[in-house]
């Protein structure tokens, strides 16, 4: 197995990027839909989205996560994505 970069595609903008730059949303068997975080390394069907407000909003408006995960995605997932984006933007501005 090579040590190359693993590429994934954002469900909204369809751009291929290193998977470490994208946020992973997972449909877990029995647990529904969850966000992958530092403490969550779940298995199941996944979808990836860019950490940008335009991609998150497009995914919500056009139901791209629902289509990719083949299940309903609650508004709480989108709210969590928006909160994560706000936190990362705040951390980035503090680092400057």
Image (tube, rainbow, N blue to C red):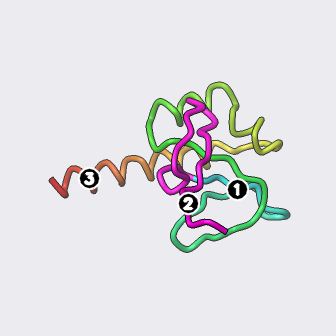
Q: Position of residue 56 (x, y in %)?
A: 53, 36
Residue 14 lies, with reference to residue 4, above or below; the image says above
Q: Quadrant of the N terminus?
A: bottom right
Residue highlighted by disc 3: 92
Task: Judge depth for marks 2 and 3 and give the one in front.
Answer: 2
Q: Which residues are magenta?
A: 1-23
Q: Is residue 8 above or below residue 59?
A: below
Q: How many marks?
A: 3
CA gap, disc 1 to disc 2?
23 Å
**Residue 51, x across and y down, in percent:** 46, 44
Q: CA distance from mark 3 to mark 1?
A: 26 Å
Q: Is residue 13 left or right of residue 29?
A: left
Q: Residue at x 60, y 31 (%)?
A: 14
Task: Please state if 28 lies on the left or on the right of 34 as rendered.
Answer: right
Q: Secondary structure at mark 2?
A: loop
* Residue behind mark 1: 26
Residue 68 horizontal/vertical position (percent): 75, 40
Q: Kindly identify which residue carries mark 2.
A: 4
Mark 2 or mark 3, earlier in chain: 2
Q: Nearer the viewer, residue 93 or 76?
A: 93
User: Where on the picture, by quarter, is residue 43?
Assistant: bottom right
Distance, label 2 to label 3, CA atoms, is: 27 Å
Residue sitting at 44 percent across and 38 percent down? 52
Residue drawn at the location 84% of the way across and 64% of the way down: 30
Q: Nearer the viewer, mark 1 or mark 2?
A: 2
């Amino acid at each position: 197995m090579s040590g190359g970069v693993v590429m994934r595609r954002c469900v909204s903008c369809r751009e291929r990027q290193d998977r470490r730059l994208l946020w992973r949303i997972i449909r877990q068997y029995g647990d529904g839909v969850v966000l992958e975080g530092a403490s969550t390394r779940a298995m199941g069907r996944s979808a990836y989205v860019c950490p940008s407000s335009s991609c998150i909003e497009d995914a919500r408006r056009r139901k791209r996560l629902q289509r990719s995960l083949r299940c309903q995605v609650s508004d709480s997932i989108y709210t969590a994505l928006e909160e994560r984006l706000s936190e990362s933007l705040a951390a980035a501005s503090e680092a400057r």
